[in-house]
Image (cartoon, rainbow, N blue to C red):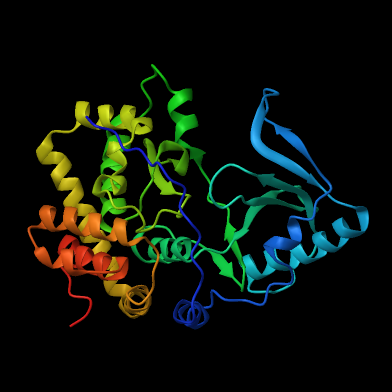
Amino acid sequence: MEYNHIEYKKPFFKVKSGLKSHLENYSRWSDLPISYQDLTHYQDLAPVLDQAGNPTLWYSAIYRPTDLEMLQEELTKIYELLVADGTRIPYLTIVAIEFCSFGNSKPFRIKVKNDINDNHDYFYIKRIDASRIYGLELEEIFSPDKISFLTSADTLVEEHIVGIPCDEFILKNENVKIANRLRFAKEFVKFNERCYSRLLGDMRAYNFVVEITQDFDNVQYRLRAIDFDQQSFEGKRTIYLPQYFKDNKSLVDLATELLSPEIAQQYMKEERVAMRKRYVSARRRTRSLLKTMRKDKISTPENIAQLGSELAKYHQIDQFKLFDNMGDMLTLHLELQLGIKIFK
């Protein structure tokens, strides 16, 4: 099998007026009290270690005391906007502001603690990027899980998605037969199909998490994307299929071992049916988003031409070759994958 390789870093794309209007209509746009840029004025960075004492990709951001006090107050307000629509939540404390230089968005991770019970939560502040926002909105529409995020002129705020990063899960369970392996294999097939149908790329193992739920008689799994930077950007069709990443080989091997081609096709069909139902319940929102996306530029002409050619070959429809934007490409691809008509 030839594995995917992403050679170049994706550029950031500005949020234009059409996307801003969509976000305002669906309560995703807010006047945030501070911006991503405000958090970059730290004095120093200190490595964050894991439980075993090993360095992670995160660094603790160190600020001047007066700046830190202001940031803690404003970050608390942002958390209240994210989880409670701005309603004041008493007894909250910002206990950590951490920075990651790895990846495209260079996020800040904010740790919030409830002083009453010591329960804590996280959220993320990132530079705004139109393609990532399209990815988040498509996740809200077509995923079985909802996702909370807010945007402003130059800042994106995202909730923390709970789960074990899949690369860590794979490493931890190497040479171990996990509970309910069949369920895990089924979930990977469905996740693979969901990513492909909505053209979410770069789902290497560290870009999605494993959510584990103890059912009354067994363990259940859910795979959830946590990185949406590569929404409809790349030109290679297989970039949108997690099965073609080397990091995910053990998941592909598990699905191949446990599922016949016929059963895998059945699960793929089940996921497309579920996505079609989600579309029906969010038809107006989907049309608003795709109408905006069809007028936007979130990829390069070279990538658009390549993906158009490859999807035309896959679907046996030359119309893909005529498109000059990813919005038109995704709209027709969704219609064919899900058996729906989005625009008449």
* In-image side of 129 versus 141 (left or right): right
Quarter holding the N terminus is top left
- Viewer-proximal residue among 327 and 306: 306
Q: Is residue 116 above or below residue 288?
A: above
* In-image side of 113 versus 176 (left or right): right
Where is residue 263, by image quadrant?
A: top left
Where is residue 35, by image quadrant?
A: bottom right
Residue at x-position 67% and y-position 22%: 52
Residue at x-position 43% and y-position 45%: 8
| Furthest residue in direction top, as rendered | 175
- Viewer-proximal residue among 95 and 89: 95
Residue at x-position 40% and y-position 39%: 204
Residue 214 in the image: state x and y as whole percent: 44, 39
| Furthest residue in direction front, as rendered | 302
How many discs mark residues in the rendered view? 0
Specify whether residue 198 is in view. Answer: no
